[in-house]
Amino acid sequence: MDTDRFWSVIEAARVGGPDGKPFDEALVDLLAALSKEDILAFQTRFDEIHAAVYRWDVWAAAYLIGGGCSDDSFMDFRAGLIALGREWYERAAADPDSLAEHPAVIEAATDGVDEALFFEDVNYVAHTAFERLAAAGEDFNEEWRRHRSAQGESGDGGPATDPEADMGEDFDFDDAEEMSRRLPRLAAVYLDELVA
């Protein structure tokens, strides 16, 4: 599955179905209409796009928006960036501080909610869709390993298993001055909560 097709599936799910399902459920439905190999190919592309924003500057944005951000929460945040669609994902990848302009971030900050853009269920849509189609005894994880092996890859993949992943320059998320310098728009929205 190429990048354009991946994003077209994401955009179709963002529109939702005729019954107005939440994004993750609509995405599972769309994937379950594909072949099992297409679902595995979707997961491959998802992992690549998810890994591309495994960077300290993006994590800092997640830290501000979430009032803190653990390793697991950062996985959910990156899934949430994908759920925003291609335009916002690419914008955030180029400049994480631009998320200060996203309507969900603005609304969450106004309402004092720290869960904007964190979307855990999106991490598992391919698994859920595959399980709908799986024959008895067929396991997503085993098929995923087979698929990766056929692609010439090993292991489970992703930046968390890649010690060579370049995350950019590390910096202290609890240093208000540093956060204001690196993410001025997000810091202006969230910094009072961070240092309070």
Image (cartoon, rainbow, N blue to C red):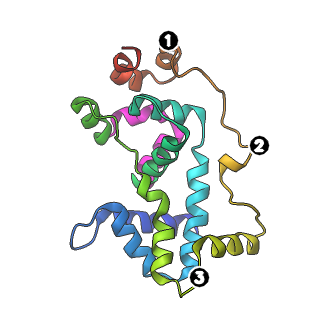
**Residue name at image x 40 percent, y 33 percent:** 66
Please indicate whether residue 4 sits to the left or right of residue 187 in the image: right
**Residue 129 highlighted magenta (yes or no):** no
In the rendered image, is residue 1 in sight? no
Residue on which the image places disc 2: 164
Can you say which quadrant of the picture contains the N terminus?
Answer: bottom right
**Residue name at image x 70 percent, y 39 percent:** 166
- How many residues crowd around disc 2 within 10 Å: few (fewer than 14), some, or many (20 or more)? few
Q: Which of pointers 3 and 2 indicates the residue nearer the eye?
A: 3
Disc 2 to disc 1: CB gap under 8 Å: no
Say which quarter of the image contains residue 64: top left
**Residue name at image x 51 percent, y 18 percent:** 174
Residue 154 image point, x, y percent: 76, 63
Q: Is residue 13 above or below residue 166?
A: below
Between the C-alphas of marks 1 and 3, the distance is 52 Å
Mark 1 or mark 3, earlier in chain: 3
Q: Which of pointers 1 and 3 indicates the residue nearer the eye?
A: 3
**Residue 88 highlighted magenta (yes or no):** yes
- The one of 8 and 59 positioned closer to us in this rendering: 59
Where disc 2 sits, the SS reads loop
- Check disc 1 and give the amino acid type: Glu
Between the C-alphas of marks 2 and 1, the distance is 29 Å
Residue on which the image places disc 1: 177
Q: Furthest residue to the front?
A: 137
Mark 3 or mark 2, earlier in chain: 3
Residue 101 image point, x, y percent: 34, 35
Residue on which the image places disc 3: 138
- The one of 171 and 92 positioned closer to us in this rendering: 171
Magenta extent: 85-102
Say which quarter of the image contains residue 115: top left
- Check disc 3 and give the amino acid type: Glu
Between the C-alphas of marks 3 and 2, the distance is 33 Å
